[in-house]
Image (cartoon, grey):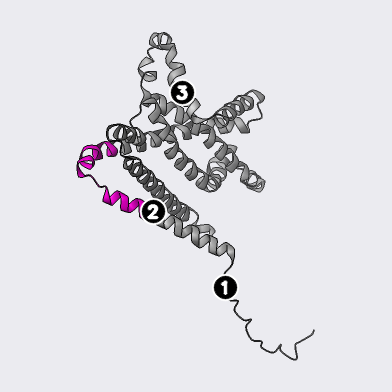
Amino acid sequence: MTHVIEMIPPRAAPPKRESKINSARVLGFLLLLLWALLGFGLLSMMIGNWDQDKFVKYGPRFLSGLATTVGIVVVSISCGAVLSIPIATGRMSKNRIANTLTYVYVYVFRGTPLLAQVFLIYYGLGSFRNAFETVDLWWFFRDAWYCGLLALSLNTAAYQAEILRGAIRSVGRGQHEGAASLGLSRSVTFWKIILPQALIVALRPYGNEIILMVKGSAILSIITVLDMMGETRYAFSRTFDYQAYLWAAIFYLAIVEILRHTWAAIERRLTRHLKR
C-alpha cells in the first residue's frame, strides 16, 4: 500500500480574464439598441395618437375577438389531442393498412399549408350543399366557425400524433422489459409506465404546438370568422388606423407570453423529481 509523503503546494488562482470588446458584441449591442428605439417609437406613437372614441367603440369588439380566439384554440387543441391518439397508434402499428393510412394523413396535413386546408374545407366542402342537407349536416359546413374549428383540429391532430409517437418511441426498451419481468400486462405497462414518461418528453413540444395554433388561428379571419384578427380587420376597414394591428399584435404577444410562462411552470412542477 502506498501513501503520500508530500502534498502539492497551493497555487494561486488563475487570473480572471477581462472581457474584450469585439465586433460581434458591438453588433449585438447596436441591434438591441435599434430594437429598443423601435419599441419606444411605437409606444410613443400609440400614446400620442390615442383616440378615446375609437377605444370605446372598438374595444369591446377586440375583447370579443380575443374570447373567440381563445375558445377556438382550446376546442381545436382538445379535439386534436383526442384524434392524435388513434393516429399515433396507427403510425406505430405493425398493421400495414393502418400504418399506411395514418402515414398518408400525417403527410398530407403536415405537408400542405393550413390556409389551403381551411379553404378546401370551407369553400370545397361547401360546394356539396345538397349532399350535406340530405344528411342534415349543412348547419355545420355553412358556418365559418365550425369549418375553421374542423380545419384546425385536423391540422393539429397530425402534429400532435407525431409528437406523441416520438415521445413514446423515446422511452427506453428497458422499461418494457422491466414491466414484463414484473408480470404487468401491456395495457398497464403503457398507461402506468410508458405514457407518463412519454408525456414529460412531449410536454415542451405540446406547448410549442399550442402557441403555433394561437398564431395560426388568425388565418380564420379570411373566411369571416370574427376572431382577434377578424375584429382587427373590421376595425381597420372602418378607421384606416394602423394602430388596430398594433393592438392585435400586443394581444397575441400577451397570449403567447402567458402560455409560455404557464407551460414553463407546469414543466418545472412535473419534472421536479428529475432535478438534483
| Tag 1 near tag 2, CB within 8 Å | no
The x and y percentages for residue 19 are 57, 73
- Which residue type carries mark 1? Ser
Q: Tag 2 or tag 1, which sits nearer the N-term? A: 1
* Crowding near the residue tagged with mark 2, few <14, some 14–19, many ≥20 C-alpha atoms within 10 Å: few
124, 54: nearer the viewer: 54
The x and y percentages for residue 110 are 56, 32
The x and y percentages for residue 9 are 69, 89
Q: Residue at 59% across / 79% down in the picture?
A: 16
Determine the secondary structure under disc 1: loop
Determine the secondary structure under disc 3: helix
Q: Quadrant of the N terminus?
A: bottom right
Q: Tag 3 or tag 1, which sits nearer the N-term? A: 1
Q: Is residue 1 left or right of residue 183?
A: right
Q: Quadrant of residue 18?
A: bottom right
Which region is colored magenta?
40-63
Q: CA distance from mark 1 to mark 3?
A: 55 Å
The dot on residue 119 is 3
For disc 1, the marked residue is 19
Q: Quadrant of residue 190?
A: top right
Observer-side mark, 1 or 2, equals: 2
Q: CA distance from mark 2 to mark 3?
A: 36 Å
The dot on residue 81 is none
Q: Residue at 47% across / 56% down in the picture?
A: 268
Q: Is residue 53 left or right of residue 66?
A: left
For disc 2, the marked residue is 39
36, 93: nearer the viewer: 36
Observer-side mark, 1 or 3, equals: 1
37, 190: nearer the viewer: 37
Q: CA distance from mark 1 to mark 2?
A: 29 Å
Q: Quadrant of the C terminus?
A: bottom right
